[in-house]
Image (spheres, rainbow, N blue to C red):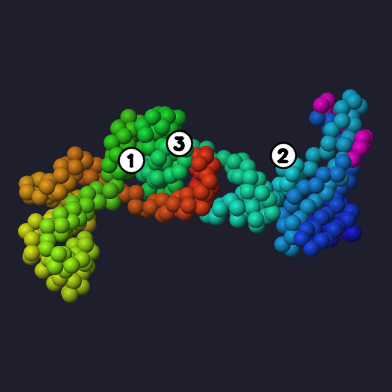
Amino acid sequence: MHSNCTKNLLGLEDIILKKLIQADNYVTFFIETAPTTQTCPHCGLETRRIHDYRNQRIKDLPMQMKHTYLVLRKRRYVCSCGKRFYENYDFIGTYQQRTSRLSLKIIDLLRKVRNLKSVAEDVNVSVSTVARILDTVNYSAPSIPDCIGIDEFKGNAETGKYQCILTNPKKQQLLDILPDRNQAHLSTYFRATSRAERDRVKFFICDMWKPYVELAKAYFPNAKIIIDKYHFTRYVTWAIENVRKRLQKTMPAKLRKYYKRSRKLILTRYAKLSEENKKACDLMLLYNDDLRLAHRLKEWFYNICQSEKYSYQRTAFWEWVKDAESSGIAEFENCAKTLRNWSEGILNAFKYGYTNGPTEGYNNKIKVIKRISYGIRNFDRFRTRILHCSI
Ligand SMILES: [Zn+2]
């Protein structure tokens, strides 16, 4: 066969195609290379003396949807020092069972959120091969930007119940996945970064998990600690939800039926309700003083959150906390107490405007990866997969 033809067909340089077998479900190319001068890996002298040949079957990218193999006539040279050695071939990977381009293709396919099995089927290798190739992908710990966000997700790794996701909310970047949210793990992780790097961190955004704050104080002494908005507004939502549930329980069955739609009516911002729903909401609030007051507090709190004027937010926040604390509604008294405890981080959220919201998309991606990688309990592999699909 003409050598140009081979090149086009196989896309490999300096290959001589000797024979081609096309079966229904596979293609095999019998190939060899031209002899060249070799440098002995043992002594460094040059040699052209051929000792013998051995055929090796190598898996390649599927061609025409068929399993594709290269049978390479591997040449063994012998040196004047007496040692024998095989020629090196650029297109074969380290363990010589696959072409390098097949491995690279698998690595590329793994960037898509899909399970290992479907990748394996695409390129006709076993799932364990795909897993092994995934293990060769390595993401080292990133350098720390001046703004970092940390959040957790319920993972399925053997390292702990919750894994952490480290992000740069400013740039909406995923930085790393950490094996556990406990302090020992987090400390080990951040201790590995240089003091100078940590000192440069200006903002640290987290939820209301004490160890995060303690960690930030210890490792990022110059950072403003910001509580993620979603996490603290949730307390207000929970408070009014619990008021509603409490009231609903004490209602006669007849009225309870009427309150069936109440959850959405009460949780939605009043301004966003249709005229009809506003009336329905008004009626509901008229029925009970606690719920009316709770609703007023909820709306007020959301207004504070939405304001863009920090000076107003700061004053209003404290007014709100004091009002809620003396509201006589246990749910809001508790909520206000919590917000008071976290006031510094909450006020920083108002002042600087950073949230973990922009990186929420990564949490969704992780959820999907978690779902499709049922078997993966190995944290390193799970981490690699997430980073590989995201970075
Ligand atoms: Zn030698």
Is label 1 or label 3 in front? Answer: 3
Residue for point 18% across, 56% down: 245
From the viewer's perspective, is residue 265 above or below residue 229?
below
Q: How far is disc 1 from disc 2 in space, using C-alphas? A: 43 Å
Q: Residue at x 65, y 57 (%)?
A: 122
Q: Which mark is residue 159?
A: 3
Residue on which disc 2 sits: 94
Q: Secondary structure at mark 2?
A: loop
Percent position of residue 9, x then y: 79, 59
Residue under label 1, please give it. 204
- The question of residue 41 being in magenta is answered with no
308 or 330, which is in the foreground? 330
Q: Nearer the viewer, mark 2 or mark 3?
A: 3
Label 3 Cα crowd, 10 Å radius (few <14 / some 14-19 / many 20+) = some
Query: In the rendered view, does 294 fall on the left or right side of 9?
Result: left
Q: Viewer-proximal residue, 95 or 319? A: 95
